[in-house]
Amino acid sequence: PSGANVPALVIGTGYGGCVAALRLAQAGVDVHMIEMGMSWDTPGPDGKIFANTTSPDARSFWLRTKTKQPLSNFLGFPIDRDIPKYTGILDAEEFAGITVYQGRGVGGGSLVNGGMAVTPKRENFGAILPSVNVDEMYDTYYPRANAGLGVATIDPAWFDTTDCYQYARVGRKHAQRSGFPFVFVPTVYDWDYMKQEAAGAVPKSALAGEILYGNNYGKKSLQKTYLARIKDTGRVTISSLHKVTSVTPAAGGGYTVVIDQTDTSGATTLTKTVTAAKVFFAAGSVGTSKLLVRLKATGALPALNGEIGQGWGDNGNVMCGGANHLWDPTGSLQASIPTGGIDNWNAGGAFAEVAPLPTGIETYASFYLSITKNPNRARFSWNAATGKVELNWQTSWKQPSIDMAKTIFDKINAKEGTIYRTDLFGTYKIWGDHLTYHPLGGAVLTKATDNYGRLHGYSGLYVIDGALIPGNTSVNPFVTITALAERNIEKIIATDL
Ligand code: FDA
């Protein structure tokens, strides 16, 4: 309620926010979590909570009147369609040079993501977070994160035989024939559930193509893991459809937090003010950066340092498709959870996940999301004239990612006698270089904050999400975001409470 005084307020309910809330609550602290998206716990008219990827509806996108699907075209035809404007689950947030996809709702990105739960190779960790003790991460915090998230790897014998991973076996064959290591990618999908889906024994989700707009059954999103444990503590309240708009020092100590309550059209219905002793920014790389940049520039938090908004990267995301021969089908049934990747990180700077194209028909296409060692970093800044935070990323900054991905796919094409698909991202466009799913940075560890996420300039303000990570994790980021949050909150609870 407005006027309340809370010991700890967490902005956002993704990975960083959930780790902070759970550990604070377990330490005896009452926590209030604020989430701009919906709670995603009530079925729609079709009896399901989440919409299917093949038939997007109002639930699918955050305040858009037309879908903006990552694959805009198929067989040359545009596939985006009109939808009612609603506080849906996937935000395709557009900056001048890049579209940044993010989850909106209680559970953040865990609601919409592919569930790939990858711990970076230990030898690559120093380039990701150079100030963090590697032994502590690999002995304590990565194992804690993997256990908390329910990470597991596919049964290799089932992988070898099930129809729904034929597309990934084709990817493995092509990788190995060109001399690249193929690795299994652990996930947070319930593999026993997927086996039962394949056997026709339970309602389908991965095998019904559910992914981008939520997963109704088998994926262990944060709703099934950290948020369930948070609920069990009895110490955490969560306000959904509430958006934090300001944080500023309060006269009597602590911070005054201004929060807009909205309806499902996005309109503000009520503005509330609460006082919090400690505030955790966990609004995601983009959400946290936008808030901090604006609050610094407009005088609400003027003592934040000049690193705020800096060091942002796209985790080197770039997508492409391969056109296979007619004797090399990828299967009409494709599990929506990717489970294998081609590793050419050390030699070529690219790790390519074999992604599904769950269209329900045979496409003779292989589809890949590559994570690359793209060195470009962008910065968020406040535009006083428009009243908006801008990001200076340029589309051409993806060229290093394309070059790195080509170290894999040019070789595979040469070996197999195949070519790139040109029908997935627009006419004759080979590379999906217009987006990222993995925004990272903007309030980087040891730059905008100390080595545990305490913001420089203010005691009692913390960053605890993907904004801490300087632009790249060499693999999909959420396990690293979770593990770093586990490390930081342990220190904060031990020393700051
Ligand atoms: P996260 O974005 O999860 O949570 C932030 C929350 O804060 C959101 O719920 C947001 O609505 C809320 N918020 C923002 N501003 C607010 C405000 N002012 N007030 C209140 N609330 C606010 N990663 C991976 O490791 N494996 C994968 O397979 C994938 N796949 C994937 C697919 C797609 C489609 C997407 C969009 C993303 C992925 N990712 C992924 C990325 C992964 O989901 C992402 O890195 C994490 O969710 C980031 O976690 P954070 O805790 O930083 O923020």
Image (tube, helix red, strand yellow):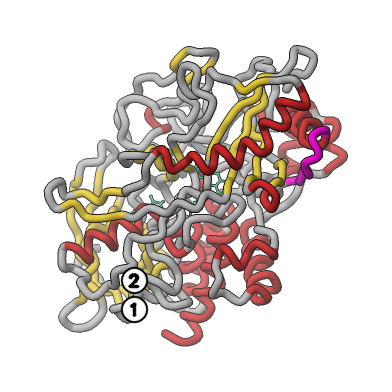
Please, which residue is most extreme toward the right here?
A: 157
Does the residue tagged 1 have its C-beta within 8 Å of any atom of ligand 1? no
| Rendered image quadrant of residue 357 | top right
Q: Dot 1 lies on which element?
A: loop
Image quarter (top left, top right, bottom left or bottom right) of the C terminus: bottom left
What is the three-letter code of the residue carrying label 2?
Val
Taking depth in this image into account, of 128 and 299 the one nearest to the observer is 128
Q: Position of residue 275 (x, y in %)?
A: 24, 72
Residue shown at 35%/20% (left/top)? 82
Please, which residue is most extreme toward the bottom here?
A: 495
Say whether residue 376 is left or right of residue 321.
left
Q: Position of residue 307 (x, y in %)?
A: 34, 67
- The residue under label 2 is 279
Say whether residue 277 is left or right of residue 434.
left
- The residue under label 1 is 460
Taking depth in this image into account, of 345 and 441 the one nearest to the observer is 345
Residue shown at 29%/78% (left/top)? 457
**Would you say residue 423 sits in the magenta stretch?**
no
Q: Is residue 29 visible?
A: yes
**Would you say residue 182 sits in the magenta stretch?**
yes
Tell me where the magenta segment starts and ends, as one range.
177-184
